[in-house]
Image: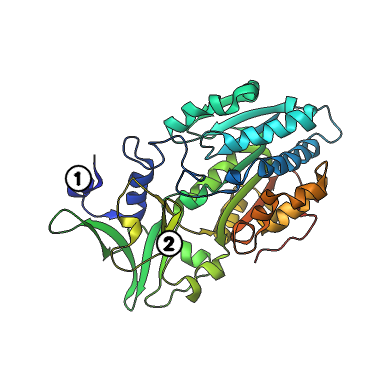
Amino acid sequence: MRVADLIRERGPLTVAAFMEWALYDPDDGYYARAGHRSGRAGDFFTSVDVGPLFGELLALQLAEMWRLLNAGSTPSPFDLVEAGAGNGRLSADILRAACSRDREFYDAVRLHLVEASAAARAAQPGTLADITDRLASSSSALPASFEGALMANELLDALPVHQVVMREDGLREVYVAGSQTGVQLQLVEGPPSTPLLADYLERAGVTLEPGWRVEINLRAIDWVRDAGRRLTRGFIILVDYGHEARELYSPTHATGTLTSFARHRSDGPETAAPAWLQHPGEQDITAHVDFTSVRAAAEDAGLTMIGFLDQTYFVLGLLPALPDPQSAIRNPQSKTLLMPGGLGSTHKVLILGKGVGAPALRSLSFKVRAT
């Protein structure tokens, strides 16, 4: 069903409902129709596309986490869950690094790949190839329970968001509607679809000024709470671009952060006929993550924050643990991962723990700072 038909059947859609269809519809959704979307031949670029170095660094941190969980006891299996795994390339980089440098950790891993796209899941065995012996499950849902570590690289920014705008008479929600001609989509304003939107802003301590247009990611909050409840003991590593609430909901971002990506071109937020509204199902749509609310949701689920920092400092904490750190630092992959204004500072790393105390992790050894 095309989105125009969906609107004719149901009426105007919240931006969240529109994104759900445009990104995740089993037949027409952007992510559902292909096994891989990033890289030079894709529409956007992630740390994984830089090369295997990002996976090698994560392997070091995950191995340390496994040993912390087993301190003073017989080594036990380690559930490694990757959410939004795509074709499994990041997990493959992690496991190949572990296989060559830390066989004890490699043998302990039980890999669980979580991915909404059936096409991407079908591509995972080919990506893992020689390390498929570690694959315990591939599914569209998180495991019912697990002990070890959950990681998600650029997942939360792609979850459907509501968009709201503050007017003189109060909060209004933005909806996607059909035009009179029925050819183009347009935005209209209406009452909030749920009181949870106002509750979200109040809990984050946010006061919007008249005219401000912002996004609210209720799905991210639900996802983090659910993940925290399923984790019996261990860690969660979230890598994404975003800000604390005080920065995200400020004059700097008062026109919103909802953005579309196609062929490595980003079209910023607009107030009329935004680019993300055009060509639904054919381009990526993302919004910056509110890490303040994500952290609060994690705490609701019994997690504690261990660290929140720029990817730059996360990488610098791990590079010295590589066999040849000087060579690694000179590696062009390192420069890309560390680049100020690029992946290094725009991407934040949030590390959460459950039942593990407050360990001094290697990735937090350089500096714990989020710009």
Observer-nearest of 346 and 239:
346
**Residue 10 vs residue 104, the one in the foreground:** 104
Label 1: state its secondary structure: helix
Q: Residues within 10 Å of mark 2 (few under 14, many from 20)?
A: many
Q: Split into 4 quadrants, where in the image is the C terminus?
A: bottom right
Residue under label 2, please give it.
215
Residue under the image location 17 percent in, 53 percent down: 183
Q: Residue furthest left?
A: 181
Observer able to see residue 293: yes
Percent position of residue 356, x then y: 75, 44
Q: Seen in the image, is 12 located left or right of residue 39? A: left
Q: Residue at x 21, y 48 (%)?
A: 4
Q: Which mark is residue 5?
A: 1
User: In the displayed structure, does residue 174 sit left or right of residue 216?
Assistant: left
Q: Amino acid at mark 2?
A: Glu
Residue 105 picture quarter: top right
> Can residue 359 be seen?
no
Mark 1 residue type: Asp
Which secondary structure lies at badge 2? strand
Marks 2 and 1, how far apart in space?
25 Å
The residue carrying pointer 1 sits among few (fewer than 14), some (14 to 19) or many (20 or more) residues within 10 Å by Cα, namely few
- Give the quadrant of the N terminus: top left
Q: Residue at x 63, y 42 (%)?
A: 51
For residue 364, above or below residue 128: below
User: Which of 92/252 is in front?
Assistant: 92
Residue 355 in the image: x percent, y percent? Answer: 72, 43
Cβ–Cβ below 8 Å for labels 2 and 1? no
* x then y, percent, for residue 153: 58, 46
